[in-house]
Amino acid sequence: MSSSQASWWPLTVAALTFITLVGCDVPTGDPSPSINTDTEISTPLVQEKTFTFLGGPNSEFDPLIDTTSSDFDSLFEVESSNNDISVVQEIDNFDIGNLNEALDNATGSLTFDQKTLDETFIDLKKEGFTFAGEKQIEDLNVELQVSAKADIPVRGSRVAFRKSQNNYVELGPTTIEVQNITSSPTAPGGVFDSLRFTYPDIRIEPYGEDNQLVVDFVENPCGSGPCGSNGEYERDMGDGFRIDLKGARIYPDKPNIDENGTVTFKIGGQVNPDLMVKNDDKISLRASTSFDNFEIREIDVDEAKPFTVAVTPNENGGDINVANDNEVRTAAFDGFEGITDRVDGLKLADVSLTFQVETANLASTDAQVYAAIQGTNETNQIYLRGTEDQNMSRGADRNVSPLPSSDAFATFTENGSPLPNDSLIKLGVGLGGASLGETERTSLVVDGDNSNVADFVNALPTEVRLAGQAEINTDGGNLRVRKPIALDANFSLDVPLRIRDRFVVRDTIDADLSDLNDLTDPEEDVNISTAELQFSYTNGLPLGADVKMTIVDDKGSAVRKFNDKFDNDSFRIEPAAKDEDGAAAAPSSGTFVFTLGSTQEDLRALAEGDKIRLAFNMDQAGSGGGSEAAARLRADDQLTLNRVRLEADASIQTGN
């Protein structure tokens, strides 16, 4: 290097160094570095939680519906062989009681009149006897065996009795009385040696033709009952008599409903042969026979006009007020009590009720029960309505129907407003094969072909109110009735648990979301790329579900709701495929994700989450297998949440 070069080189290096330093940004202030940290949260909240549709606290898996609770212990019944579920409800405590007024209504004003027999057996003057003074009657050529017959009028215009059919009236505590017995001429020894009253149309048990009511007047009666050698009653000569006919039967001759009839009685006797008579004497007898405290306890008639009887009390004898507790009978559907505490909108498909009518001591061609059957719960009411039966295969047994337009029954009202006939139901009860002394049970199927029973049951009534009236013997034929007359009714509901529409089931799972606190420090700059709850499931129910989620804190207060209106199809559990009977055939599986938010503010409140409330809006949409059958549920059908996981990804920048 030359000397000149040596002199300028250091200066050049110094100048370049200065320029370089001037062009750089030299840091001032906090000298610490800026750091970006990727943070990932992956917290399992639930590992394989399985629900069965039904169960109890001792079940292996949590039940969606706890059948051991007071809400459901009497609602569901599980078949042990295949776990099929039936909805079972019974109402057997309407306690309608007796219909004794039916007998009075059937017979109307049937009465047996008093009859006075005034009979002259021997008229000596008319027979041409002329003699002075007195003679013994046995010295005269007259027949001393005398007899007479009289007919007691039977009045009434509702029933007909035919002797060829042995139709009868059986009496309650009724007495027959004969009084005002007078005979002439008067004589110290009496006019008659013997006297017999015979009632061939009145029979005492066992009611054979040889069991006619016979009363003999004798000197030394055997007793008060039928103690004669052939079952005759015996009374002192010259007295009247009063005999209790309770249990006796009268066989009137009254073949036409609209005409009066008769009951015959006869008098026969032996005139005292020592009786002293004058030539103008008449041997006669006068006596009145009547029924006192007349009461009928049984009838068997050839024809009877149709008649009505109150099935439930009718205080004023006019309109039947369904709102009046004194004019209805009530019973409870216990299994529906409180159901909405766990399940909303449960609707059953293929619903039918069995309505069983029990009658005792009523044998007729038929009875038609006209009824207002009202189901109520805390908020709603509905009437069980009859409709024209669409099931033609029932033939003559199509005995559930709407009420006809008729004056045969009283008007049903509710607080003064008449109920239209299409809010009521008629139940036909065949009684042609009934026997007195036995309970006759008639079962009627009330289903979707003849009623609105599905709407009635799916209203989940907790109380059923029944008001009714019966029309009996509608074709006017043979009728047999005996007190006490009983009628009762009960409902039974026993149908497979088939779901018609949507319903909502709720459940709560533990879920600690405090890990979200790692992303909510206000001193940190957080860039959240993902924050979500991931659900995976396997569904063995023949029902799908839209899912609503609510995060709640440790005090039970809602922090935030997701899919509150069930209107986002992304939060969906798909149903299992169904077989042709509607049961689950193959499970479905899948995932759905709830996005929690993308800012620290979104997550800060959720970090207080302690539990997750899930609501499953169950339905049949999208079920596979090609089956259109309504979903049929089994007790061990399962829904499994294979995993519920909290997932979050974020970048946290610390420092400057």
Image: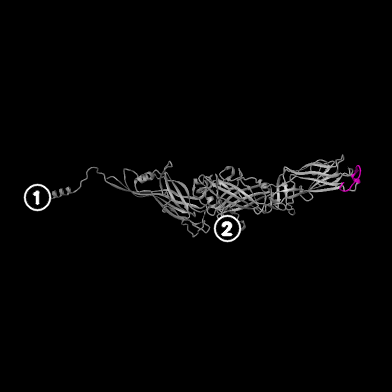
Label 2, residues with CA under 10 Å away: few <14, some 14-19, many ≥20: few
Q: Is residue 25 left or right of residue 83?
A: left
The first of marks 1 and 2 along the sequence is 1
Kindly give the residue lying farthest to the top in the view shown: 188
Query: What range of the chain is rendered magenta?
Result: 124-139
Is 511 or 133 nearer to us in this picture? Answer: 133
Q: Is residue 360 magenta?
A: no
Is 622 or 231 nearer to us in this picture? Answer: 231
Picture disc at residue 513: none
Residue type pointed to by label 1: Ser
Residue type pointed to by label 2: Asn
Label 1, residues with CA under 10 Å away: few <14, some 14-19, many ≥20: few
Label 1, on which residue? 7
Would you say the residues marked 1 and 2 are in contact, meaning their CB atoms lie under 8 Å apart? no
The secondary structure type at the circle numbered 2 is loop
Label 2, on which residue? 391
**In this rendering, does residue 466 appear at all?**
yes
Q: What percent of the width, then of the height, locates residue 567?
A: 42, 52
Q: Quadrant of the C terminus?
A: top left
Q: Is residue 131 magenta?
A: yes
Q: What percent of the width, then of the height, locates residue 504?
A: 47, 49
Q: What percent of the width, then of the height, locates residue 389?
A: 57, 56
The prevailing secondary structure element of the residues shown in magenta is loop
Q: Is residue 280 above or below residue 538?
A: above
Mark 1 or 2: in front is: 2
Q: Is residue 543 left or right of residue 477?
A: left
Q: What percent of the width, then of the height, locates residue 508?
A: 46, 46
**In this rendering, does residue 85 appear at all?**
no
The Cα atoms of the two marked residues, 1 and 2, are separated by 125 Å
